[in-house]
Structure formats: structure tokens, C-alpha cells
Image (cartoon, rainbow, N blue to C red):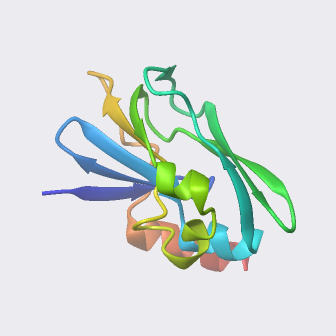
Amino acid sequence: MSQTYYSSDHEWVRVEGDLATIGITAHAAEALGDLVYVELPDPGREVAAGEAVAVVESVKAASDVYAPVPGKVLEVNAELADDPALGNSDPEGAGWFFKLRLAEETDFSELLDAGAYEALVEESA
């Protein structure tokens, strides 16, 4: 069974066991506009929670994508690199950015559940 968390930086993380899939939220994709380029991390890279790991460029701006949790990059979404528009059309599905093997002592307490994330988005609107 998977659990999805959200960061205040507008990333989502779907956790299944010791694996985490990470991408940007639909809110972030909408705010960025049409995505035109994505730079993904190298597999094997160790990342810390809060570390800038990827870059997304849109017609409006370039933004860092942060790792909401610590771990080791196992896989990147080559489809997204080839077709950045996936990040707009399905940001919380096929538009995922990278997958991590979670660090042993991963703490999710700084992350938000869906309701808390929705409230954060509404507050900033």
C-alpha cells in the first residue's frame, strides 16, 4: 500500500515500502505553465531531504525540484526528459521525476498530507 505526502515546496512523494517516487504537484505544474525542459539527477546519487535534485524549465521560469526525503536515486523518468509536457498533463502520475531508495531513518513529519497541502495552496492563492 502506498502513502502520498507533499512538501511546502510543491513536490509530492509516493512511498511504497522503502521506495519513493517524487514529482511536482499539479499546483506547481499549473503555476509554472508549459514545461519545456527537465534536468533529472543521475542514478546512484545520494540526496538529502531539502536538496535541489532536478531542474524544470517552463515558458515562465526555471525552478529547482527538491528531494522531500533522503535516499539514493534509483531511476529517473526518461519519458519526462524526452517529453517535458508530461509534467503538465499528468504531474502526479506519468510525469514523475525520479525514484529513491529511502534512507533508513527517513522522517516524514515535515511533510504534509493531502488535506494539509490543499490548505497550504488555498492560503497562498
Q: Residue at x 54, y 66 (%)?
A: 25
Is residue 11 visible from the viewing direction of this image? Answer: no
Residue 67, x across and y down, in percent = 53, 38
| Displayed quadrant of residue 19 | top left
Q: Residue at x 33, y 59 (%)?
A: 4
- Taking depth in this image into account, of 32 and 78 the one nearest to the observer is 78
Q: Residue at x 63, y 53 (%)?
A: 9
Residue 76, x across and y down, in percent = 46, 42
Q: Is residue 75 left or right of residue 101?
A: right
Q: Quadrant of the N terminus?
A: bottom left
Q: Is residue 110 above or below residue 48?
A: below
The total of numbered circles placed on residues is 0
Q: Is residue 104 above or below residue 93?
A: above
Q: Residue at x 87, y 67 (%)?
A: 60
Is residue 68 visible from the viewing direction of this image? Answer: yes
Q: Quadrant of the C terminus?
A: bottom right
Given the current orientation, which residue lies at the most extreme front position? 82
| Displayed quadrant of residue 74 | top left
Q: Is residue 66 above or below residue 12?
A: above
Residue 78, x across and y down, in percent = 49, 48
Given the current orientation, which residue lies at the most extreme right position? 60
| Displayed quadrant of residue 30 | bottom right
Residue 32, x across and y down, in percent = 75, 68
Q: Is residue 76 above or below residue 105?
A: below
